[in-house]
Image (cartoon, rainbow, N blue to C red):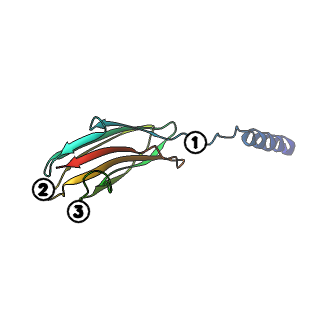
């Protein structure tokens, strides 16, 4: 009986230790912005921004971010500190849709801004960020 138990233990160990090694995930998530359309947007203080993007990954998404900030040395400079807005999302799965409605403050400074969409998967791979130019005038 002891020999039979020993055979089961040894054979079980052999089967579990011979599992195929997992291939590391090196594929970046993909961001497809669905709103706004195009790479440039003209708005005024008090206007509404409808922001949306589809995020996909081959294994599993982890987090995402939408960020609005001053563009810096592009085109019309913002003279003060400008207006900023950001939101970070904890997500999962192979696909996720981000959707936000953001109202530009009525006192937002006139000038050039960036709307940036970012995503990372569970393996730490970062998507190529998508940047939309936003001109507030």
**Disc 3 target residue:** 79
Alpha carbon of mark 2 to alpha carbon of mark 1: how far?
43 Å
Which part of the image, by quadrant, shows the N terminus? top right
Q: How many C-alpha atoms fall within 10 Å of the one at disc 1: few (<14), some, or many (≥20)?
A: few
Q: Which mark is residue 128?
A: none
Q: At 69% across and 40% down in the image, what residue appears?
A: 21
Q: At 26% across and 57% down in the image, what residue appears?
A: 77
Alpha carbon of mark 2 to alpha carbon of mark 3: how far?
16 Å
Of mark 2 and mark 3, the one earlier in the sequence is: 3
- Per the image, label 2 sits on a secondary structure element best described as loop
Alpha carbon of mark 1 to alpha carbon of mark 3: how far?
42 Å
Of mark 1 and mark 3, the one earlier in the sequence is: 1
Of mark 2 and mark 1, the one earlier in the sequence is: 1
Q: Nearer the viewer, residue 101 or 84?
A: 84
Q: At 23% across and 64% down in the image, what residue appears?
A: 80
Q: Residue 106 carries which label?
A: 2
Q: Nearer the viewer, residue 127 or 76?
A: 76
Q: Tell me where residue 52 appears, x and y as whole percent.
A: 29, 40
């Amino acid at each position: 009986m002891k020999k039979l138990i020993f055979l089961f233990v040894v054979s079980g160990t052999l089967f579990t230790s011979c599992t195929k090694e997992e291939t590391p995930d090196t594929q970046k998530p993909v961001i497809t912005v669905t709103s706004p359309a195009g790479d440039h947007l003209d708005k005024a203080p008090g206007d509404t921004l409808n922001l949306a993007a589809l995020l996909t990954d081959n294994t599993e998404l982890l987090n995402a971010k939408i960020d609005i900030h001053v563009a810096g040395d592009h085109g019309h400079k913002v003279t003060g500190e400008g207006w900023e807005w950001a939101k970070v999302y904890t997500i999962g799965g192979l696909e996720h849709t981000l959707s936000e409605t953001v109202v530009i403050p009525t006192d937002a400074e006139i000038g050039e801004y960036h709307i940036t969409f970012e995503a990372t998967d569970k393996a730490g791979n970062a998507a190529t960020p998508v940047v939309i130019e936003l001109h507030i005038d």
